[in-house]
Amino acid sequence: MTNKTLKIKGMHCASCATIITNKVSKLGGVDAVSVNFATEKANVSFDDAVVSIHQMNNEVEKLGYTFIDETSSHPMEDHSMHTGINESKDEKMKELLVMKTKTQFVLPIALLVFILMMWDIGAKLFTSVPNLPLPMSIFNTISMVLASVVLFWIGQPFLQGVVKFAKYRVANMDTLIGIGTFVAYLYSTCITLFPLMRVALKLPETTYFDVTIVVIGFVMLGKYLEARSKLRTGEAIEKLLGLQAKTALLWRNGTEVEVPVSEVQIGDIIIVKPGSKIPVDGIIVEGYSSIDESMITGEPIPVDKKTDDFVVGATINKQGNFKFKATKIGSDTVLAQIIKMVEDAQGSKAPIQAMADKISSVFVPIVLGIAVLTLLLWLTVGTSALGFSTALSYGILSFVGVLVIACPCALGLATPTAIIVGVGKGAEHGILIRNAETLEKLSHVDTVVLDKTGTITKGKPEVTDIISLDTAWTETDILRASASVEKLSEHPLADAVVVKATEQNILLETVTNFQALEGVGVEGMIGNKHIVIHKPSKSGTVTDNIKELQEQGKTVVIIEVGKKQIGLIALSDTLKEESKEAVAKLHTRNIKVIMLTGDNYLAASYIAKLAGIDAVIAEVIPQEKAGKIKELQDGGAIVAMVGDGINDAPALVQADVGIAMGTGTDVAIESAGITLLGGDVSKIAQAIKLSKMTMRGIKQNLFWAFIFNVVGIPLAAGLFYPAFGWLLNPAFAGLAMAFSSVSVVSNSLRIKAKKL
């Protein structure tokens, strides 16, 4: 079997992915198809002796899509493979600008027409409401011009949906919108342009140009917001790619040679200088340094590296020069694997999407069938009872009435209006929500997984303990001596010691004969005192004091004067003030709280105990984080992942809901569905409450919208005419549609008044 990754051109809605999947999977020789709407790519497994990419493309082209074979053996070299966009970003931005222009054009018109529609219907029902200040003929002509522009320019994708349905029997909600708006437009045009025909057939003067304009206007707004969100999704991948070093300094034939990172080969010896990015993954062969691996691990304390230690591409060398041998390049690097996991998780479908596709594919033909059947029954049964002219008039009225009343205006407004209100309310409270899918999922969450560093902790090392081992030395004396020496050090932990001394307004002393002890610590002279600061030796005796501090996950350094230990300083990432309260709030909602971190188990367990967290999963590398989330999901949990680092990105998109701290990295924020401004974890519980309120409003809206269709369609079809003489004029069908829309909007606005 051959496996290919194909870019797809022409996708504009989630159901496009379903249509392409169904079409390609039916071809002989195709084993499996996975279409990723987020990245607009398809992974296809097929027998190239039976079917070719050209043949697949011929089939999808019939539906308006195009396959482009851009599979690359080195994904890290081809950035376009990971952008999640069909064309270049500039081209995609141009498309979005065009869509924005169309939305800005049609939305004011739609709102104005909606108001005029309500005015006209009110004038027909209530004598106290004056008629429109324009003759109906002039009003119809203006409406026809506006509707023509809206339908054939703005509504072009919906008309294409009608063509696809007619040709290939593939349908989505675009198809129904297209049929409903086009039939309303066509009927109204005939009434306007051929008044003699209307009089001859005894048809009312009522037109439905307003239906065409209003429905397309509101739906177009939703599509623009969806496209904007989708473009931002691709930016997460672009930012991950931007982390990679652009060049590498190779050691060849005794000289330094700078080359593009794409030219690095396995086995090359690479030189890394202080402050530079490590270009690829490899093993240190010479030298020593301290490396900031927070991009991968999320932990703020740099890691000391020596010969034979593994280094990761895109991490930052803080101090020291070293050489390493490249062992992984291109798509095999840790960063490339993280990118792939983010892409894969972004492309996964929510169950509600598949359900919506199935409903729409059934709903369209059912509504059409009812409309056609209604017309036929009036022409057959109605003619015998009422005569042909009356039956034809009633049949056309009923046919149009069914399509008008079935037009998904209320259904289309049910979700976006509640979402707009819910998202706005969230923004007021510092909770930024990306889309409706995220809100829907958040309302069902029963497990919250928290990253440690930067999420429930402050994300930077601080001095937590100063212990005197000699009565002649106070804690202040120990801090003064340590900070005086550490001030001359480049090691990141030294900054925390100096900051602590500064906070206590301690005046530092002059240090001479300073020296960094490679892999050990630092030393210097303060007057006639020889000060040495070093980590505990792995082979040496560990005192009870040191053991206790290490069991709390703290980093311990020993201060010696003249080879005598005079004190200890412990450093650690500390708990945020609001973290304990945030966990307690989640517990009140019967939500299980788990910590997931790359830090060691002792440090994680200590912090978890302080915060009241239920369980700890520690010492997990980024590639494993998403897998741990999936294990929880496979066990039946609905998971929200909360993180702030690049290393959290795969887990954020794997989770049912990804929640990023606003103080975290751009990659984490772009990978998540929700962002908490200010990094306040106490807002997690508020976000869950908001989601439940919003989803309750959406369900209420959908209920009334469906009830409207269930009751309205039989009434519009004339089902009650034989028994009660009830026949719904399309004018009242328009009123009913308008009322259903107003009720949906009003119900959504109730969310704004509720307290979080």
Image: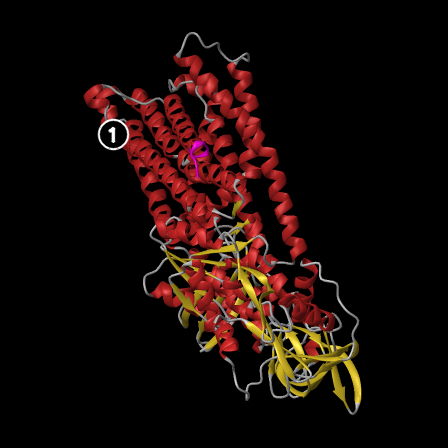
> Residue 578: image x %, image y %?
50, 51
> Residue 521: image x %, image y %?
67, 80
Q: Can residue 67 be seen in this snapshot?
A: no
Residue farthest to the left, as pictured = 723
Q: Residue at x 53, y 27 (%)?
A: 111
636 shown above or below 682: below
For the magenta stretch, what is the residue range? 751-756
User: Dot 1 corresponds to which residue?
Assistant: 380
Residue 524 in magenta?
no
Residue farthest to the top, as pictured = 128
Residue 753 in magenta?
yes
Work out which quarter of the rendered image holds the C terminus and state it: top left
745 shown above or below 671: above
Nearest the viewer among 599 and 331 is 599
Side (left or right) of 607 relative to 501 = left
Q: Which residue is drawn at 37% across and 22% down?
A: 732
**Which quarter of the picture shows residue 261?**
bottom right
Give the colour scheme shown: secondary structure
**Which quarter of the picture shows residue 138?**
top right
